[in-house]
């Protein structure tokens, strides 16, 4: 009897491992990949998904990361364009016109994101993808609010029409990549706050409960669509433990511990920008070490991993970067610096960029990455699923594994022409669009998702178009820091 029980337990363990193979998972305060510890030392490259780089350039970007042991990259999964102006970027994931959003699956929309995922996949780099920006860069929350008749920035978190529109977009994005192992995590928002940076003000009624309730609803919704991937908030991680200290007083509705306690949030994300947050330059290094310790302690208490997923200081200070990476390493925690740059491609520099040829990169970033890799963090085992991004991307890349260098095999497909129709996101019903035969989805990824759990009274279907939309400029918006 004992033998049968042992065999059953072993079978259950193997089945569970098989179900999660290739996906990053959590085990207590740690991440795991294929049953082994996975410590994140990575970076951010928001611009990788906002400019239509060639396949050769995308290969250069992600292979440069991989060769320096940067195993995870955070990049934007949003870019909203309204009908009244031009955007300073040439990728548009969602087009708005008179309150009607259309998700762009064409070559400068999700069709391009397919290529980003394919390049990361081939290089062995995992991706973290947030779905909306708190700031006005790349459209952001205020586009939803303005297009759907809201008055305040924080209407985004409470107005049912706006929440439905957000879910519409998320559903298209998540179901497209639900079986893609290259995705490490989905994030609800980049740096959600009650206040934004655009013309819309906050209502005065927004608080920690407002944001926490929204995160609870949206993270549960994503989990109902996709059980393979982790979900995180994407917030800056302000604490709400000491009203006498600004960054610990729950500013603008952010409460790290309350957000981390949400059942459908898998790990805690936090940022660190002492120079932008009012910390004296002389105190930045020691402040950062304490900030890390406090968030690691919160993760330990919650029994979940935490990631310092954005950090930077102006002017770039090697002593601070070194002290912070040493503290995270000592804590066996996780971090992603803001932001990665490739010198040969002249990628965007917002003053925080550390380029692959910079001395700071070789002496601090690459050195720290190698230390983390020794703990466990390799993604050298390439994923094998042929879903979503891989269908669009794998055939276009040829890889020499011995050199980890890729060559471009084919050009991106010429955009097809479709007549887009839009969905009125202000209503509770959305008309299901016809299947997009040019989106690069396989049968499983493009299957009808009507059986997924959705809020009562809402049909969360979004209109899509594969017709390229928006401007052709390669100019990137400046990514500002906000206190």
Image (cartoon, grey):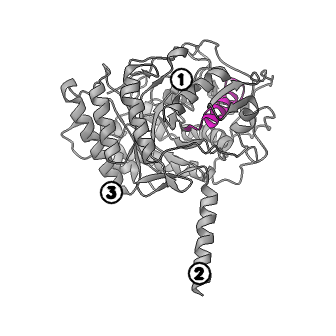
The x, y position of residue 355, in whole percent, is 45, 21
Front residue of 190/402: it is 402
Residue position marked by numbered label 2 in the rendering: 5
Q: Under tag 3, what secondary structure? A: helix
* Residue 114 placement, left or right of 360: right
The x, y position of residue 190, in whole percent, is 46, 34
The quarter of the picture where the C terminus appears is top left
Tell me: residue 479, above or below residue 205: above
What is the crowding at mark 3: few (fewer than 14 residues within 10 Å), some, or many (at least 20)?
few
Span colored in magenta: 103-126
The Cα–Cα distance between marks 1 and 3, rounded to whole angstroms, is 35 Å
The quarter of the picture where the N terminus appears is bottom right
What is the crowding at mark 2: few (fewer than 14 residues within 10 Å), some, or many (at least 20)?
few
Residue at (81, 34) in percent of width and height: 437
Residue position marked by numbered label 1 in the rendering: 47
Residue position marked by numbered label 3 in the rendering: 301
Front residue of 265/15: it is 15
Instruction: Find residue 276 and report its image quarter.
Output: top left
Q: Is residue 365 visible?
A: yes
């Amino acid at each position: 009897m004992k033998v049968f029980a042992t065999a059953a337990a072993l079978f259950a363990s193997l089945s569970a491992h098989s179900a999660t193979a290739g996906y990053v998972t959590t085990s207590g305060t740690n991440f795991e990949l294929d049953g082994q510890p996975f410590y994140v030392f990575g970076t951010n490259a928001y611009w990788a998904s906002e400019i239509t780089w060639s396949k050769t350039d995308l290969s250069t970007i992600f292979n440069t990361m991989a060769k320096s042991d940067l195993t995870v990259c955070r990049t934007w999964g949003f870019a909203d364009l309204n009908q009244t102006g031009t955007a300073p970027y040439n990728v548009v994931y969602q087009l708005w016109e008179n309150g009607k959003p259309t998700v762009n699956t064409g070559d400068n929309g999700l069709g391009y994101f397919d290529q980003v995922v394919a390049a990361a996949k081939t290089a062995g780099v995992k991706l973290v993808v947030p779905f909306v920006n708190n700031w006005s860069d790349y459209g952001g929350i205020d586009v939803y609010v303005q297009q759907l008749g809201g008055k305040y920035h924080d209407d985004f978190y409470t107005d049912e029409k706006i929440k439905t529109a957000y879910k519409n977009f998320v559903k298209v994005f998540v179901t497209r990549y639900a079986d893609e192992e290259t995705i490490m995590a989905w994030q609800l928002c980049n740096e959600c706050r009650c206040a934004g940076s655009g013309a819309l003000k906050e209502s005065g009624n927004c608080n920690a409960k407002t944001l926490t309730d929204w995160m609870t609803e949206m993270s549960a919704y994503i989990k109902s669509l996709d059980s393979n991937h982790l979900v995180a908030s994407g917030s800056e991680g302000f604490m709400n433990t000491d009203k006498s200290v600004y960054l610990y007083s729950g500013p603008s509705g952010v409460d790290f511990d309350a957000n981390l306690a949400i059942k459908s949030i898998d790990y805690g994300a936090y940022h660190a920008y002492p120079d932008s947050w009012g910390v004296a330059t002389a105190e930045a290094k020691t402040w950062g070490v304490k900030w890390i310790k406090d968030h690691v302690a919160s993760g330990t208490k919650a029994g979940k991993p935490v990631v310092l997923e954005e950090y930077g200081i102006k002017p770039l200070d090697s002593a601070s970067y070194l002290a912070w990476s040493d503290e995270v390493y000592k804590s066996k925690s996780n971090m992603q610096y803001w932001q990665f740059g490739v010198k040969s491609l002249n990628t965007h520099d917002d003053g925080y960029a550390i380029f692959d040829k910079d001395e700071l990169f070789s002496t601090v970033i690459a050195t720290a990455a190698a230390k983390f890799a020794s703990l466990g963090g390799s993604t050298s085992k390439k994923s094998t699923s042929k879903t979503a991004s891989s269908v669009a991307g794998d055939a276009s890349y040829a890889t020499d594994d011995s050199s980890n260098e890729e060559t471009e095999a084919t050009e991106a497909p010429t955009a097809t022409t479709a007549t887009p129709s839009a969905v009125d996101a202000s209503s509770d019903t959305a008309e299901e669009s016809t299947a997009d035969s040019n989106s690069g989805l396989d049968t499983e990824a493009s299957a009808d998702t009507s059986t997924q759990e959705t809020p009562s009274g809402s049909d969360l279907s979004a209109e899509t178009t594969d017709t390229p939309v928006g401007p052709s400029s390669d100019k990137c918006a400046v990514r500002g820091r906000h206190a």
